[in-house]
Amino acid sequence: MKKVRFGLIGGGFGALIGRIHKMAAELSGSAELVCGAFSRDPNQSKKAGVELFDIDPNRSYPDVETMCLTESTADEGRRAEVMIVATPNHSHFEIAKQCLSSGFHVVCDKPMTVSLNQTQELAELVKETGLSFGLTYNYTGYPMVRQARRMVLEGQLGEIRRVSCEYLQGWLAKDLSENKQAAWRTDPELAGPTGCFGDIGSHAENLVSYVSGLEMKEVCADLTRFVPGRKLDDDGTVLIRFSGGARGYISASQIALGRENDISLEIYGTQGSIEWKHSDANSLVFRSNDEPLKLYRSGGPGEENMSRDHGLPAGHPEGFIEAFSEIYRNFFENIRDDAQAEFPSVMDGVRGMRFLETVVASSEEGSVWKSLEGEVR
Ligand SMILES: NC(=O)c1ccc[n+]([C@@H]2O[C@H](COP(=O)([O-])OP(=O)(O)OC[C@H]3O[C@@H](n4cnc5c(N)ncnc54)[C@H](O)[C@@H]3O)[C@@H](O)[C@H]2O)c1
């Protein structure tokens, strides 16, 4: 199988998610890291490429601009085809724009940008260029999350009435401005208009939309800052009215002491309900009033994802990096084989950013109901 060549932006010394992108992309079995601009500091960037990723020193670039210029004019059989953006939120827009304009497909981490206008501009650029744009809403890569979506879409739950999703973390329960990851996440210039909701509520919005298949119509939000001096929300809850009449909520917190990356989803319909939680990601519970509960397991009986020929037999735990790599597998299938595999797209990014901006507006105006309807360009 031909390997897709990719470049990585971010992921330098001490960075969190860049190396996960590399591992996940390569774990998909069909890609290799060939170049990168790994840090804002040109010297650190060049050094990181060699020391952390062992790539050709000539392709460990000082900055994104130099990388785009050099790679886009390199031999076709050698140059990078995809650029992965794993930098803090405020930089996604300019970097993604530069990569698309230079002819590269892009995979970007969430939230896609820091404003709806920016996401819409990128969506237009994706349309104009015909290039692919993926977003790493990686929770949708878990086999049991995909199973849940199939069960909902096939009508096994009946008509959906109630959807709830919580994403609880405790690591920002006190001021951590010395911590590299905390510093930019709590700075509006770098994180965007929301802290906790942009960082993890964004995952919850995507998970809810992906599994339920429902459109959010209106939201009423209450975002809070508990840590003194903090400029962005570190906790909040959003009530949601969906098209079709279902109701629900998303609650996200980074001050929930002792909680790790505890995202969980519950959906209740007229025939049954499902529950999935990240702390037991290889299980999916189905309940109804008429029979004992059913426990679905990754790779186990009843799991319907026939495309999981790469998956492990039941009982071998699959985790975060495997789920992440599913997003990459689908993305690469699309650009390499022209397949129609689904992956979180630029339109998920536009919808996600509309959600975040509306949530912030609702909360700032005193927790009023706000419509999410509007043309998605
Ligand atoms: N999908 C997920 O589960 C997940 C998890 C964590 C973070 N994220 C997202 O990933 C992004 C990065 O988060 P992180 O925690 O890894 O941040 P981080 O601060 O740990 O790392 C960011 C890296 O980007 C580099 N960088 C910044 N500007 C750059 C530029 N212009 N050119 C090249 N490199 C540059 C920094 O030097 C650093 O190495 C954020 O958007 C975050 O929301 C997603």
Image (tube, rainbow, N blue to C red):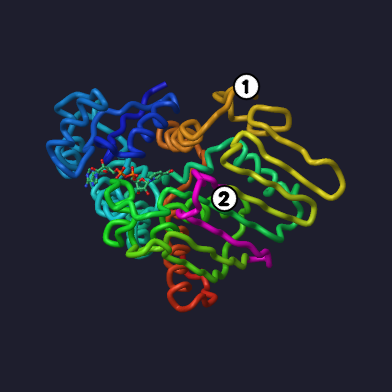
**Rendering coords of residue 90 (x, y %):** 29, 56
Query: Residue drawn 36% across and 39% down?
Result: 17
Q: Kindly identify the amino acid type of the residue bearing the numbered disc 2.
A: Tyr
Q: Quadrant of residue 113?
A: bottom left
Q: Which residue is mark 1?
A: 313
Report the residue that reaches farthest toward the right: 290
Q: Earlier in the sequence, mark 1 or mark 2?
A: 2
Q: Which residues are magenta?
A: 243-263
**Rendering coords of residue 260 (x, y %):** 49, 43
Ligand 1 within 8 A of label 2's CB? no
Secondary element at tag 1: loop
- Residue 25 falls within the magenta-colored stretch: no
Report the residue that reaches farthest toward the left: 43
**Rendering coords of residue 147 (x, y %):** 65, 39
Height in image: 55 above or below 326? Answer: above
Query: Residue drawn 46% across and 52% down?
Result: 200
Tell whether 10 sits left or right of 47: right
- Give 359 or 93, whichever is nearer the viewer: 359
Q: Which residue is mark 2?
A: 210
Secondary element at tag 2: helix
Height in image: 66 above or below 197? Answer: above
Q: Residues within 10 Å of mark 1 (few under 14, many from 20)?
A: few
Q: Quadrant of ligand 1?
A: top left
Query: Residue drawn 46% across and 69% down?
Result: 358
Residue 116 visible in this rendered orientation of the protein: yes
Query: Residue drawn 18% across and 38% down?
Result: 67
Q: Quadrant of residue 23?
A: top left
Q: Kindly identify the amino acid type of the residue bearing the numbered disc 1.
A: Pro
**Rendering coords of residue 264 (x, y %):** 59, 48
Q: Quadrant of residue 59?
A: top left
- Give 91 or 81, whichever is nearer the viewer: 91
- Give 42 or 330, whichever is nearer the viewer: 42
